[in-house]
Image (cartoon, rainbow, N blue to C red):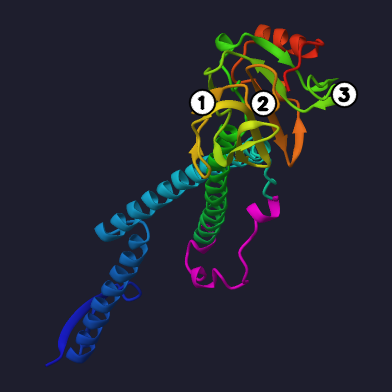
């Protein structure tokens, strides 16, 4: 059944009757509802751009935290790189210089990683640029740390070897200063007391009573402990690094061939054996089979004043005993 409605006609100044079909009424109602729903949906879309859901707010907070952690990590990376650079500088200019090792070239320390697609799997994300930069920085720092770690291992090895070398090089008097009567003859030309010819004296003679202890001047291995016509009872020590020492005219040898000795170990006693005219120790220092002046190898045992006095005595023309 059609629905009757009236409307006011302003032209005729009267009400006119119209008939509205139910189908038209339903259509208008449906279209009205659809319009309201469309407007509501559009409003929801617009508002959703400004009003975030709890999940979105949580994601935003997480992203902000990640960015904050990234900034903190980047700052720590910069600080670590700065500390590493200082360590590299000391490594090349102090440690390696002291231990006489070649510095590590910059191209070796800062070599880049090969492969243009190394970080390809990090592309395509919202923060790819940030992630790639941090990953590259970590890779570079990791490689530099590996190079520096290897270098420090080498420095430790060099330090141990240096310590071993310093302990081996002759550095003390073979006879204690308080046990000596005097320093009889130095490293120089002088008249031989038995042969009566001018001959170069390759060592130093220390006068002391027979039985006075004689000590190894550095760590090493006894390579000879024997009796000879010239040196009498004599001990030879190989200290390594090209150094050897000779202790001659002993009254008694305590060290034996093949024995390992340390600086300050008792190796024998002063005597007057071999080609000698009085009780004393004849002491020589050799480097690469060449005799050196022993006066330069007492730095671990004498004060500056004592060294100056011994040097003066060695230069004087005194009595020679062998």
Horizontal and vertical percent position of residue 197:
87, 24
Residue 99 occupies quadrant:
top right
Q: Is residue 289 above or below residue 27?
A: above
Question: Contact, CB < 8 Å: mark 2 with mark 1?
Answer: no
The reply to whether discs 2 and 3 touch (Cβ–Cβ < 8 Å) is no
Label 1 vs label 3: CA separation?
35 Å
Does residue 82 appear in this view?
A: no
Q: Is mark 1 on a helix, strand or loop?
A: loop
Q: Residue 264 carries which label?
A: 1
Which residue is drawn at the image coordinates 57% and 13% (left, top)? 209
Q: Which of marks 2 and 1 is nearer the N terminus?
A: 1
> x, y (%) of residue 116?
63, 71
Kindly give the residue lying farthest to the left in the view shown: 1
Give whichever of 91, 6 is nearer the camera: 91
Can residue 240 be seen from the camera position used here?
A: yes
Look at 26% across and 74% down and name the residue there. 37
Is residue 4 toward the left or the right of residue 9 in the image?
Answer: left
Start-end of magenta stretch: 105-130
Q: Are marks 1 and 3 in contact (CB under 8 Å)?
A: no
Residue designated by label 2? 283
| Horizontal side, residue 51 vs residue 153: left or right | left
Mark 2 / mark 3, whichever is N-terminal: 3
């Amino acid at each position: 059944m059609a629905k009757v409605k009236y409307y006011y006609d302003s032209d005729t100044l009267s009400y006119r009757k119209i008939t509205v079909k139910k189908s038209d009424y339903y259509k208008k109602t449906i279209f009205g509802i659809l319009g309201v729903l469309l407007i509501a949906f559009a409003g929801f879309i617009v508002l959703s751009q400004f009003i975030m859901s709890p999940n979105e707010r949580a994601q935003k907070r997480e992203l902000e935290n990640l960015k904050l952690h990234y900034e903190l990590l980047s700052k720590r990376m910069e600080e670590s790189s700065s500390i590493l650079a200082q360590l590299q500088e000391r490594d090349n200019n102090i440690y390696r210089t002291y231990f006489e090792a070649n510095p590590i070239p910059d191209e070796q320390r800062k070599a880049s990683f090969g492969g243009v697609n190394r970080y390809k799997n990090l592309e395509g994300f919202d923060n790819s640029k940030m992630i790639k930069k941090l990953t590259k920085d970590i890779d570079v720092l990791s490689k530099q740390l590996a190079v520096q770690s290897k270098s420090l291992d080498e420095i430790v090895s060099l330090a141990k070897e240096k310590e071993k070398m310093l302990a081996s090089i002759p550095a003390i008097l073979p006879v204690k200063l308080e046990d000596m009567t005097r320093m009889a003859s130095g490293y120089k030309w002088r008249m031989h007391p038995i042969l009566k010819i001018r001959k170069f004296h390759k060592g130093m003679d220390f006068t002391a009573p027979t039985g006075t202890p004689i000590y190894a001047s550095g760590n090493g291995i006894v390579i000879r402990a024997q009796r000879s016509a010239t040196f009498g009872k004599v001990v030879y020590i190989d200290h390594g690094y090209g150094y050897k020492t000779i202790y001659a005219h002993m009254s008694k040898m305590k060290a034996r061939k093949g024995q390992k000795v340390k600086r300050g170990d008792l190796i024998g006693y002063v005597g007057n054996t071999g080609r000698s005219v009085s009780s004393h120790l004849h002491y020589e220092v050799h480097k690469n089979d060449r005799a050196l002046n022993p006066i330069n190898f007492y730095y671990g045992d004498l004060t500056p004043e004592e060294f100056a006095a011994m040097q003066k005595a060695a230069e004087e023309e005194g009595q020679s005993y062998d």
